[in-house]
Amino acid sequence: GAGVPSANRITRLADNDGDGVAESKSVFLDKLYSPFGMALIGDTFYVANADAIVAHTLDKTAMTAQQSRIITELPGGPRNHHWTKNIIPSKDGTKLYATAGSNSNVGENGMEEEKGRAAIWEVPLDGKAPRIFASGLRNPNGRDFAPGKDALWTVVNERDHIGDNLVPDYLTEVKEGAFYGWPFTYFGNHPDTRAPKPGTPPPQAVAPDYALGAHTSSIGLAFSDGSTLGPEYAEGAFIGQHGSWNRSVPAGYRVVFV
């Protein structure tokens, strides 16, 4: 899905003396399929390819990955508009939360192509009975848990082509079973007349918690742990903004703190 061919690999950078500089660089895993998300639980290294979550057995002594098995498939091609699938373990380490962005800007290819997409999936580690945890999230990507709480948060890239200042990307707590509007409405219940007409009325949309600016492509999310960067950054979230491609005055290209 990217503009250039994927290397289809994960590279390991080893900093053995802890000085912040890698002494060695090696291929950790290859022959993947546009990998994006990664998670380590115990001795198992999970990778979110563009179409599936794959588990690899980790040899922590040699720092190599051995056997692999598919945990669950994720919505993929042949069209795979938002191909970057991300994963994060639950706080108890029993499941993964996986993202699957929409397959279009605003459903213009038909809702049949959006099955299982614009959503965050909850996937048990055995791969049995994965389910949609929350939906209507056009392209959720970065996620983290609020410190001390079992509350999952995400940043979401919103829709394009309705002006420089619409629609704002956002940061929000992800409530189980909630619907966040895509493609029918944005930022709560503001209607988008370009969206396909739903066969049945969609659920009432939950308004997100915090707007991050339109077209900032907010992708990375990490909550402060309160101990490393001083009192100014003790409580809040760091967000990496990839930056806009479709705004007359570019926005983003920065790290912000909320």
Image (spheres, rainbow, N blue to C red):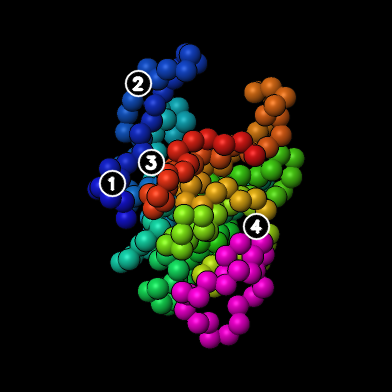
Q: What element carries label 4?
A: loop
Above or below: residue 76 compared with residue 153 = below
Q: Nearer the viewer, mark 3 or mark 2?
A: 2
Above or below: residue 222 compared with residue 216 = above
Q: Residue 4: image x %, image y %?
A: 25, 47
Tell me the crowding category of disc 1: few under 14, some 14 to 19, or many 20 or more residues within 10 angstroms, Cα based: few
Q: Residue at x 25, y 48 (%)?
A: 5
Which is more toward the observer, 72 or 117? 117
Tell me the crowding category of disc 3: few under 14, some 14 to 19, or many 20 or more residues within 10 angstroms, Cα based: few
- Amino acid type of the residue tagged 3 in the rendering: Gln
CA gap between label 1 and label 3 equals 22 Å
Q: Can residue 106 be seen in this view?
A: yes
- Amino acid type of the residue tagged 2 in the rendering: Ser
The N terminus, quarter of image: bottom left
Disc 1 or 2, which lies upstream in sequence? 1
CA gap between label 1 and label 2 equals 22 Å
Q: Name the residue under label 2.
A: 24
Q: Name the residue under label 4.
A: 208
CA gap between label 4 and label 1 equals 33 Å
- Amino acid type of the residue tagged 1 in the rendering: Ser
